[in-house]
Image: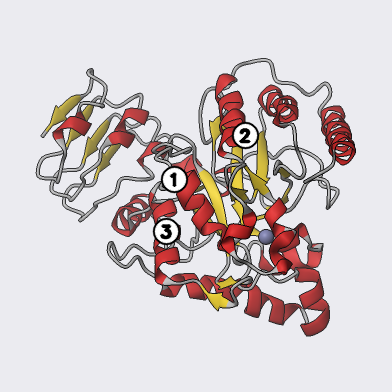
């Protein structure tokens, strides 16, 4: 239990840090209301660290334990930062855990690289050299992810766009070794690493995050100020969390070693997370993944992604698909391309006509996000008629 006085000190520290952040942005407020998501609408990125917490994310985030999916369906996107190795059980992740990670991705969330074995980048570099850190910690996880697939759906991990530094420890040199070669964006920690502030769209390199776990921010109400600051300045607030666990769930139930006691303090309750999400919704912030803040689009279905690359004339060497190239497209012909998941369609904000005939699409809920849509062809798919009714009545639908 954290004592009351320790808690007060933490509160004051956090409040003064958030105040400092306010000073940085004093006077650079935007006055017009910006409304275009993925381009310049201010937002929030919720990020969750450490692969060994997958059960907590899956059970209390996706709501598999309590039937309360905190994130909804593409309603609140988040970024989950994984490793390949369970440090407290001394083993690699098993198929069930990998399936759960892939199910997070399937729900529109980003899966980011948090190091193969969660090694401290500075210590590892000092011991073995930077080239080995890149090989053993950074690329090893990309290779591991590339080899995995979901046991039933066969879905694979997307190539990570974001790297999240374990312990938020890094140097300019470690960042230069991996950006832009392997990643677009690296997440640090706002206060630990003297990175104060908010993040602009299409950023590259290290970005700051504020940790709102109970240990750092006992009173989530302080986060309201930081959210308002993002809104007023037209920028993005990146938030760091670890486990999602209800207060009554004891850490000792997991039977992890004494060693895990410190890691056990890094948790946020579903209730506090709901509070933060609702505060962000109240002031109309958008929910982004780290990749989206970096301006990179993610398509779950590789057949859909291949078609988008063709349309944009991107060759395989262009690693990332820029969101800003998608938002002005008005017509999209994807007929007969063996597409089963339309995740990524939400970036086509100006889309008026969509041809999805002769595919395997079963879920069209994301089409309700396309406000300019006038006509959609869904002939010969795997559709559930009750879900189609979600599409705006003004849209002409062919089924
Ligand atoms: Zn970590």
Label 1, ligand 1: CB separation under 8 Å: no
Report the front residue among 202 and 253: 253
Using the numbered discs, state the Cα–Cα distance from disc 3 to disc 2 in whole angstroms.
23 Å
Q: Residues within 10 Å of mark 1 (few under 14, many from 20)?
A: many
Residue at the image position 26 percent from the left and 22 percent from the top: 392
Residue at mark 1: 62
Residue 365 falls in image quadrant: top left
Where 282 sits versus 220, above or below? above
Is label 2 in a helix, a strand or a loop? helix
What whole-number distance in Å separates the C-alpha atoms at marks 3 and 1? 10 Å
Rendered-image quadrant of the C terminus: top left
Label 2 CB-ligand 1 distance < 8 A: no
Which label was assigned to residue 272? 2
Name the secondary structure under disc 1: loop
Q: Is residue 161 visible?
A: no
Q: Is residue 28 visible?
A: yes
The residue tagged 3 is 100
Above or below 224: residue 174: below
Q: Position of residue 358 (x, y in %)?
A: 13, 48
Mark 3 or 1, nearer chain start: 1
Residue 47: x %, y % from top left = 60, 47
Q: Position of residue 138 (x, y in %)?
A: 62, 71
Quadrant of the rendered image holding ligand 1 = bottom right
Q: Number of labelled discs? A: 3
């Amino acid at each position: 239990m954290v004592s009351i006085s320790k808690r007060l000190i933490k509160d004051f520290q956090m409040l003064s840090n958030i105040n400092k952040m306010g000073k940085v942005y004093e006077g650079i407020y935007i006055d017009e209301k910006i409304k275009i998501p993925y381009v310049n609408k201010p937002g929030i990125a919720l990020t969750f660290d450490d692969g060994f917490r997958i059960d907590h994310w899956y059970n209390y985030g996706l709501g598999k334990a309590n039937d309360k999916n905190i994130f909804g369906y593409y309603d609140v996107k988040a970024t989950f930062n994984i490793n390949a190795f369970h440090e407290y059980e001394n083993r690699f992740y098993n198929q069930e855990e990998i399936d759960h990670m892939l199910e997070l991705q399937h729900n529109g969330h980003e899966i980011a690289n948090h190091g193969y074995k969660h090694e401290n980048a500075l210590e590892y570099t000092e011991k073995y050299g930077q080239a080995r850190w890149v090989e053993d910690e950074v690329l090893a996880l990309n290779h591991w992810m590339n080899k995995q697939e979901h046991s039933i759906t066969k879905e694979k991990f997307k190539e990570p766009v974001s790297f999240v530094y374990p312990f938020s420890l890094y140097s300019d040199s470690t960042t230069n070794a991996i950006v832009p070669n392997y990643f677009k964006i690296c997440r640090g920690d706002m206060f630990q690493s003297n990175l104060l502030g908010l993040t602009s769209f299409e950023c590259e390199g290290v970005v700051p995050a504020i940790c709102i776990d109970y240990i750092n921010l006992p009173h989530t109400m302080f986060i309201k100020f930081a959210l308002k600051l993002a809104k007023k300045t037209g920028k993005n607030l990146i938030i760091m969390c670890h486990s999602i666990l209800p207060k009554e769930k004891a850490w000792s139930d997991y039977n992890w070693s004494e060693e895990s006691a410190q890691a056990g303090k890094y948790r946020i309750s579903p209730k506090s997370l709901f509070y933060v999400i609702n505060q962000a919704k109240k002031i109309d912030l958008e929910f982004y993944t780290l990749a989206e803040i970096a301006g990179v689009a993610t398509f779950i279905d590789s057949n859909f992604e291949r078609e988008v690359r063709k349309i944009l004339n991107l060759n395989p060497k262009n690693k990332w698909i820029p969101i800003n190239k998608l938002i002005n497209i008005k017509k999209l012909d994807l007929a007969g391309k063996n597409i089963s998941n339309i995740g990524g369609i939400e970036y086509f904000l100006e889309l008026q006509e969509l041809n999805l005939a002769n595919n395997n699409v079963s879920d069209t809920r994301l089409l309700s996000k396309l406000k300019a849509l006038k006509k959609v062809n869904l002939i010969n798919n795997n559709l559930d008629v009750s879900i189609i009714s979600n599409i705006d009545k003004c849209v002409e639908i062919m089924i």
